[in-house]
Image (spheres, coloured by chain):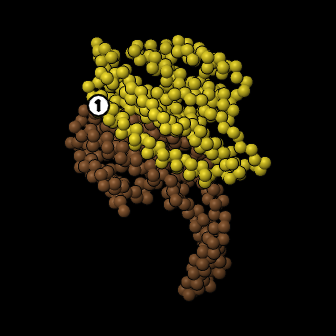
Chain colours: A yellow, B brown
Amino acid sequence: MPNSRKPKSSKSSKSSKPDPNPPQVHNFLKSLGEVLLDITALEVSTIVVDEITPHKFIPRQTYQELYPLCAEFLKDAGIHSSLVDRYLQLHRTLLLRYIALIAAPQSLLYNPQLVDAVQESYQLLGNPVNDAKEIPLQLPDPSDSREADQLEILLSTPSFLRCLRKLSEIKATLDQRNFHLQKNPDSKEADHLLNIIYARTVVQLDGDVMNSYNQKLFQNPQQQAILQVHQEGVTAAQYHWQGLLEFVIYLAQRAFPKKTRK
Amino acid sequence: MAKTINLEKYIEFPTLSKSIDTLAGINFHCDAQILEKIQRAKQRGDRLHFSKQLRTNLRCCALLGTSSYLQSGLSICTYYQQDDYAEPVMKSLISADGDVINQISGDCLSHQLRPQLTTAHYWLLQQITRQLAWQRTLIVDLLAWSIAILLILGLIIAYPQGILTNLIALGIVLIIMWGLQKILKFLLSFNAKAIDRWAIAKFLSFSISAQPWQQKMAKLFLQYIVV
């Protein structure tokens, strides 16, 4: 699952001349910089699913699906009890990402008046027993018009969008798992070997590699095949990631005025 | 030199919905024959052939999200075609911050062609990456031609009878136009970097704009201004 890394603060560029780029472009350039700062590691996960879902990422729609996830909502929706924590974790990850944006001085959502609330929220969210809906800071309500502006900014923040997109993929696999468990109420959760993140590899920029595996991998008769698919995926991702990075740097070099690049 | 293989008709770029023309991701359709082709290409070190259209679609897909939103990642799905039925077997979501989620269907995992399918999927992933960056923009050429054409049009409007009725005069005017754009190009080339930066900044602001016409302009930029 995507971790909720706090975006690292970047030194704001100081220039005596006015910025030659319009504000909108400036945001884009900032976001490119943010991507570069966010790249601390390559994380590759391999999931075996029942069914591959088509590409469909519409930010607002995904947000509306993740926003209401709370214990009560999941109970009403009839989510299998073994999956409730994992659904709650999705909402929690999104909330953490939002709070990190409120606390980051370079973010458009930065609000220094909420420093205390941020601290308290972090502490409360640190304990998984606490209900995410009970903490002082909450995600903007998509049905509340007073929070529409805040939500609009949030949904145009690249780091938040990336987080949202990854969570939507995880939610799709949880939904499938839930569907399967509901359809076969007699089957044990542990016996269901699909829709699981089996392996995850983190390659740090300094070259350190960390592998983690789901314990269900060792029950799965196809563990060798899964490991092979994962390993090939890691190799391909490293190659692809390098290319993507080069492209982002290429764009940044050409679009940043020299003065702000220093 | 490495050869290339053309798989363009098997690669499609679906849009998010009928009403939203943003590209949602890349779909790659393969069958047993194509899997074999890719195995051979991989062994020989052949590359995927990129037409201008394929490259443009790929760049639009990787850069332009739904209007006013940036693209947050690239999603690639491989379908396996068997007996008139195409089944999605693998999907990868690559996020620009370095997170990759690979999905494989349970059916594919136990399929006898599983090694070939994964090889094909990951091979495609590797092939498309290096095509994102462009070598240069054509913005200086475009500006030079536009200014030259405008000046000549002005001249024709000022002396319509003298130029349009005389073939020799028309020929001379066209030669002047060609020479003019060459001179303009030379003059503009002193400031090419700044013009390029202006064009890329404009492209970036259009690509995150909520205005549909600006989104269109961003697409046109990827289609015609970069090589």
Residue A67 position in % (x across, y down): 53, 24
The residue depicted at 42 percent of the width and 30 percent of the height is: A211
Tag 1 residue:
A224
Residue at left 66%, top 59%? B194
Q: Which of A145 and A252 is in front in this view?
A: A252
Residue A238 as seen in the image, left or right of residue A126: left
Q: In this view, does B145 lie to the left or right of A23?
A: left
The quarter of the displayed image where residue B184 is located: bottom right
Q: Which residue is drawn at 51% across and 28% down?
A: A3
Q: From this viewpoint, is residue A172 visible?
A: no
Q: Where is residue A209 in the image (x, y as percent from the top left)?
A: 45, 34
Give amino acid for label 1: Gln
* Residue drawn at the location 59% of the way across and 70% of the way down: B145
Front residue of this view, candidates B172 and B112: B112
**Chain of the residue under the numbered disc 1 shown in the image:** A
Provide residue B18's location: percent of width, then percent of height.
Answer: 43, 42
**Residue B160 falls in which quadrant of the image?**
bottom right
In screen coordinates, is A125 left or right of B99?
right
Image quarter of the N terminus of chain B: bottom left
Is residue A6 something that shows in the picture? Answer: yes
Q: Residue A136: where, in percent of width, then height?
A: 64, 17
Circle 1 packing at 10 Å, graded few (<14), some (14-19), many (20+), is few
- Residues B25 and B104: in front is B104
The tally of labels here is 1
Secondary structure under the numbered disc 1 in the rendered image: helix
